[in-house]
Image: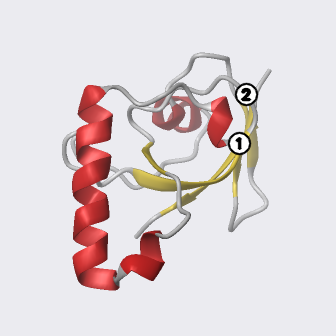
Amino acid sequence: MPRVSITDTAKTFEVNEGEILYDALYERGEVLPHGCLSGSCGACRVEVTTGKEHLQPPGVIEQNTIDALKDEFREQRGEDFIKNKEIRLSCRAKVIGDVSILPIK
């Protein structure tokens, strides 16, 4: 069973393979930042600190939103903020193995 850890806390959750990250944690009592929960607003953005290969690749909707977020972060916070960061949307990313995340505010 895959495990999802939240980097800035001591919280780790066992989830089912193929579960959507946000839904899996919500069902276990952990509410991540969110908005529309459909992949369009980007409010549920997280940095994958380890295990990016343990999430299914992003679909078109998620990738479009991630690209827009990266452009926004570049303008507002500079290139260094997004350099080497793996950004995903918790409402769209499906877990297939152990992963650690950090919500991006």
Residue 59: quadrant of the picture: top left
User: Picture coordinates of residue 9 (x, y %)?
Assistant: 72, 64
Q: Is residue 60 left or right of residue 12?
A: left
Residue at the image point whose x is 55% and y is 21% from the top:
19
Q: Which mark is residue 27?
A: none
Q: Quadrant of the N terminus?
A: top right
Residue at the image point whose x is 57% and y is 37% from the top:
25
Residue named by callout 1? 51
Secondary element under disc 1, as helix, strand or loop, is loop
Secondary element under disc 2, as helix, strand or loop, is loop
The kind of residue on which mark 1 rests is Gly
- Total marks shown come to 2
Residue neighbourhood size for the residue with mark 1, other residues' Cα within 10 Å, grouped as few (<14), some (14–19), many (≥20)? some
Residue neighbourhood size for the residue with mark 2, other residues' Cα within 10 Å, grouped as few (<14), some (14–19), many (≥20)? some
Residue 38 visible: no
Q: Quadrant of the C terminus?
A: bottom left
Q: Are marks 1 and 2 in contact (CB under 8 Å)?
A: yes
Residue 71: quadrant of the picture: bottom left
Q: Examine the rendered structure and indicate whether residue 31 appears above or below residue 70.
A: above
Q: Nearer the viewer, residue 29 or 58?
A: 58
The kind of residue on which mark 2 rests is Gly
Q: Examine the rendered structure and indicate whether residue 101 appears above or below residue 7.
A: above
Q: Examine the rendered structure and indicate whether residue 60 appears above or below residue 35.
A: above
Q: Is residue 27 left or right of residue 80?
A: right
Q: Which mark is residue 97?
A: 2
User: Picture coordinates of residue 30 (x, y %)?
Assistant: 57, 46
- Colour approach in the figure: secondary structure
| Label whose residue precedes the other's in the sequence (1 or 2) | 1
Q: Is residue 65 left or right of residue 59?
A: left
Residue at the image point whose x is 46% and y is 80% from the top:
80
